[in-house]
Image: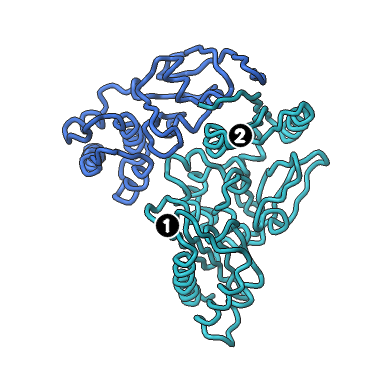
Amino acid sequence: MISFDFQYERPESIEEAVQAFQRADSAGLEPIYYSGGTEIISMARLNLLRTGAVIDIKGIPECNVMAVRQDRFVIGSAITLTNVVEANLYPLLSETSRNVADFTNRNKITIGGNLCGKFYYREALLPFLLADSQVVLAGAGGLRQVPIDLVMNGEPRLEKGELLVQIISEARYLALPFITVKKTKQEKIDYPIVRVTGLRAAEGIRMAFSGVSEAAFRSRELEEVLNDTALPVQERIEVAIRRWPYPILNDILSSAAYRTFVLRNTLTDAMEALERRRL
Amino acid sequence: MNGHPGSVKFEIELLVNDKSHHAAIRAADTLLRVLREHLGLTGAKAGCENGDCGACTVHVDGVPIKSCMMLAIEARGSRIATIEGLRNTPIQQAFVDHFAFQCGFCTPGFIMVCHALAEHRPKAGDDVIQEWLQSNICRCTSYEEIGAAIKSVLRWQG
């Protein structure tokens, strides 16, 4: 059971949600936005998270949108991963979401929770980084739309009290050739030792990563290396690994040396696959 | 209806197995705890309470959900179905026919997932069956028998 109590609110508009957050924050309740809630419940039960106010965003219409409109793919933060997989509007996102946790948990886990949670895997973030998506954020100053790269690449950098409402991607990215590979220690649904996602865009290969380090990220510097056709593919991969922007994890799932070994092999496979799927 | 910080409880109405139930709960109470401790519906089992084992699986608006991963207050206004609400379904008989359990602790969760699978995906192939059943763990390792049980129901429906 969760050992502490909190206030629960389920606003029906963005404005109500932001106001509820501000009220609770002013009262010193350290509020949090709540969508699927699986991570919040797990951490609260273990006393790894405390809050005095939970603001459930599932009643907000804008957070429940998923559609392609006027060459834009719009997805609300309260859409579950199961719905993402079944709708399959952005195949790279669907395939990447498919093994994020098990099926029943995916009925509860939402896009917003996966992107904004404390766990650093954030696998559903990677397809949006590759598509140069924009995020719609709601805060005390109203709505703002910014590149996802600015506020999510590496780690979430939302301002206090800001609510992730939607993610918007240009439709031209939805049908590009892609690859998404998840390597785990044991079960398909475990956290990844290595997750590599790649898109073949007109200007070259784009790649984003999770599980290798304590951050889910896309790096332009690494992409420059991986697209440097002056070098053989294997050498590009070695350079990319040497220039990895974060320490490679050494934890209970895998040693850093084994993770590097898996990363090298996965990158090799991914590069070959994307070469075969050239436009 | 909002809860309040502190130990304040409030009354909530839940629709479980087509019956209206009232309970005085905390906002922090999970659906699992409310079903078991307030409504006396102990079919959903408290296994890991971490979303891993699936022993607490119920249906919320027809969708299998781990009740340890949902606040009871979230379920307000939804139709909840627990193992106690299933009567003489093909999957229950199939579990008996195929000896698809040993200790039985995980059985309610597996049956709820299998029942939902039969309802939503009656023509499911092996990949879909495996994907859905990955949500649940059987420490007695009755996986072969559970797989045979669900396949017999899917065939039966087809």
Gap in angstroms between the C-alphas marked 1 and 2 = 31 Å
Residue B14 position, x and y percent, is 50, 18
Q: Residues within 10 Å of mark 2 (few under 14, many from 20)?
A: many
Specify the chain shown as blue: B
Q: According to the rendering, which colour does chain A have?
A: cyan
Q: Is residue A164 left or right of residue A120?
A: right
Q: Nearer the viewer, residue B140 or A218?
A: B140
The residue positioned 57% from the left and 33% from the top of the image is A47
Q: For residue A55, which quarter of the picture?
A: top right
Q: What type is the residue that disc 1 sits on?
A: Thr
Residue B29 visible at all: yes
Q: Nearer the viewer, residue B47 or B115?
A: B47
What is the chain letter for disc 1?
Answer: A
Q: What type is the residue that disc 2 sits on?
A: Lys
Residue A226 position, x and y percent, is 58, 76
Residue B158 visible at all: no
* Vertical arrangement, residue B80 with respect to residue B156, above or below: above
What is the chain letter for disc 2?
Answer: A
Q: Is residue B28 left or right of residue A135?
A: left
Q: Secondary structure at mark 2?
A: loop
Name the residue beneath numbered marker 1: A184
* Mark 1 or 2, nearer chain start: 2
The residue positioned 46% from the left and 46% from the top of the image is A101
Residue A176 position, x and y percent, is 55, 66
Residue B36 position, x and y percent, is 42, 19
* Vertical arrangement, residue B8 with respect to residue B149, above or below: above
The residue positioned 45% from the left and 59% from the top of the image is A254
Name the residue beneath numbered marker 2: A58
